[in-house]
Amino acid sequence: MPVRPGELELDHDCLTQDAWLSFIGHIETPFHTRADCPRNGRKTTEVAYVRVKPDFLPALKSLETCSHVIIFYWMHEAIRTLVQQCPKFAQNSHGTFALRSPNRPNPIAISVVELLEVLPDGLKIRYIDCLNGTPLLDIKPYFHQTDAIPTSEVGWHISEVKEEDSTA
Ligand SMILES: C[S@@+](CC[C@H](N)C(=O)[O-])C[C@H]1O[C@@H](n2cnc3c(N)ncnc32)[C@H](O)[C@@H]1O
């Protein structure tokens, strides 16, 4: 993806290798190109499947009692060197850490999804925005008591983005 006017991209040398991650599975969605993907999980009701590698299936124990879970995934097609970006729906450039863009030094994405069913090889879910085949990093239960902050604000978004474009 070419850098747009107002964006800032670093050299790849900024990406030091400080830790390692293991993909614990992958996510199957109906979205086969980035253009097919919704901007965030709330913009689709499509069902998706979280396929967990056999070794990690015991870690799903008790998850069937949860209505919603947080899925962490690796945006494998992301650009990792963009530190300031101009989202199409915004008027100005913003720092990567003020955005939910997949393009970031460690392209970790999250979605709070509805858990429809625990399957023998993973989860049936809805409300996720990623490409088919996106690697899976982690799954955690969603606790509304600690994870929801209804009074929270993203100031630049309030002033720059129209209501129907909600969520960066
Ligand atoms: C704006 S990001 C939000 C991701 C996540 N919900 C979050 O907030 O961390 C969602 C967009 O990332 C892009 N995307 C989806 N899967 C991707 C992948 N595997 N690699 C790179 N980009 C991806 C699509 O353009 C999609 O609309």
Image (spheres, helix red, strand yellow):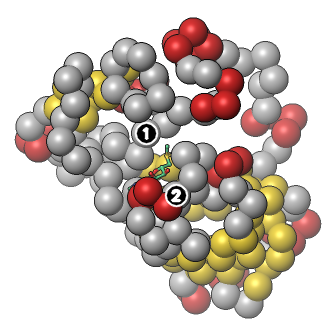
Q: What number is the disc on residue 159?
A: none
Relative vertical location of residue 24 with respect to residue 10 in this rendering, above or below = below
The residue that label 1 is drawn on is 101
Whichever of labels 1 and 2 marks the residue nearer the N terminus, that label is 2
Neighbourhood count class around disc 1 (C-alpha, 10 Å): few under 14, some 14–19, many 20 upward? some
Vertical position of residue 48 compared to residue 91: above or below? below
Q: Does residue 2 lie above or below 86 as drawn?
A: below
Circle nearer the viewer, 1 or 2: 2
**Which residue appears at 45% of the width and 71% of the height?**
32
Between 86 and 97, which is closer to the camera in this rendering?
A: 86
Spot occupied by residue 15 in the image (x, y as percentages of width and height): 18, 43
Question: What residue appears at the point 45 percent right and 49 percent down from the top-left corner?
Answer: 108
In this rendering, the count of numbered labels is 2
What's the CA distance linking mark 1 and mark 2? 13 Å
Where is residue 139 shown, x and y percent of the image? 64, 61
Q: Quadrant of residue 158?
A: top right
* Badge number at residue 37: 2
Mark 1 near ligand 1 (CB under 8 Å)? yes
Query: Compared with residue 91, is residue 2 higher up or lower down, i.e. above or below?
Result: below
Q: Is mark 2 within 8 Å of ligand 1?
A: yes
Determine whether the residue tagged by mark 2 lies in a helix, strand or loop.
loop
Q: Quadrant of residue 101?
A: top left
